[in-house]
Amino acid sequence: MEKIIDGKAVAARIKEEIKEEIERTGVKPCLAVVLVGEDPASKVYVGNKKKACEYCGIGSLSYELPADTGEEELLELIHKLNNDDKVNGILVQLPLPPHISEDRVIDAISPDKDVDGFSKQSAGALMTGEKGFLPCTPAGIIELLKSYNVEISGKNCVVMGRSNIVGKPAALLLLRENGTVTVTHTKTENIKEITGKADILVAAVGKPRLIDESYVKEGAVIIDVGIHRLDPEKNNGKKLCGDVDFDSVAEKASLITPVPGGVGPMTIAMLMKNTLLAVKR
Ligand code: GUN
């Protein structure tokens, strides 16, 4: 169907461009990937990030630490990687175990190696429009919209969710593109009145299939950031779903991202882009 946004294809094109640039220029980027604990989803994400590095010609250093690793020990590793000239980017997969402060760990990463774009310096740069690393998922959303020639300027953009990783930065990036941006959250009243006016709707609520056709305007562009595991036996063989009830919303949307194969691959492609950028800077 024409209206499905093929994130996998757009991400493949971006990774191809990165691979070619690395071959042409002979640069040797290196990403340090840090995983603490045994979270199965995090293991899959980290594995996919390492695979993408290999494809693009980016070296990766893997640090898989046990769940009972202390905060100080993790901070020491970050300091060591900050001071290692061979390492251009540092990625600490979230969530971290509850006894470790994510804020402290993220802020320990040197701003010029913060390829996830999560540090306070990167957030400040995003806010003011200065040069910095853009967070990968929100940057990937903008790339997808541009790849499909979706006009953002002047359009009603509604971002559902206000996390530091997705909702807030996505809203700021849409604003940078001159969208008229509204952010909704769990305390928003009459939410469907707001989402029902969206030309572009970004769903980052973390609830499986919450958004059905009653939230959506005819002809809207739908970007689904959610990813949730399903029992395939109860879901016609489907293993994953997003925050959007795809089948009902696809009827009304002019463009829609699937899960999987929409935003997810873009997050990884933008991480590769940031890692190459880290070398150039
Ligand atoms: N956990 C969920 N998404 C992300 C991401 O984009 N980067 C990191 N480091 N952890 C995550």
Image (cartoon, grey):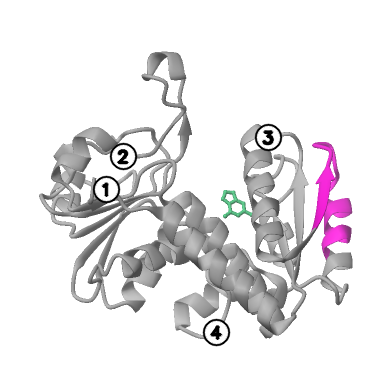
Whether residue 135 is visible: no
Residue under pointer 4:
131
Q: How far apart are marks 3 and 1 (CA)?
A: 32 Å
Mark 1 vs mark 2: give the one in front.
Answer: 2
Q: Which of 262 and 201 is in front in this view?
A: 262
Instruction: Please give the residue where the numbered disc 1 appears in the rendered image.
Output: 188
Q: Callout 1: helix, strand or loop?
A: loop
Q: Nearer the viewer, residue 116 or 160?
A: 116
The residue at 50%/53% (across/down) is 265
Q: Distance between the residues labelled 3 and 4?
A: 33 Å
Seen from the viewer's position, the closer of residues 188 and 178 is: 178
Q: Say which residue appears at 28% left-offset and 37% top-offset.
A: 246
Crowdedness of circle 3 by 10 Å Cα count: few (<14), some, many (20+)? some
Report whether 275 appears left or right of 183. Answer: right
x%, y% of residue 233? Answer: 44, 14
Real-space CA distance between mark 1 and mark 2, rounded to the nearest whole angstrom? 18 Å
What is the three-letter code of the residue carrying label 2? Answer: Val
Q: Which of marks 2 and 4 is nearer the N terminus?
A: 4
Looking at the image, which is closer to me, 104 or 246? 246
**Residue ID at (45%, 19%):** 232
Which stretch appears magenta?
A: 61-78
**Tag 3's secondary structure?**
loop
State the mark number for residue 39.
3
Q: Earlier in the sequence, mark 3 or mark 2?
A: 3
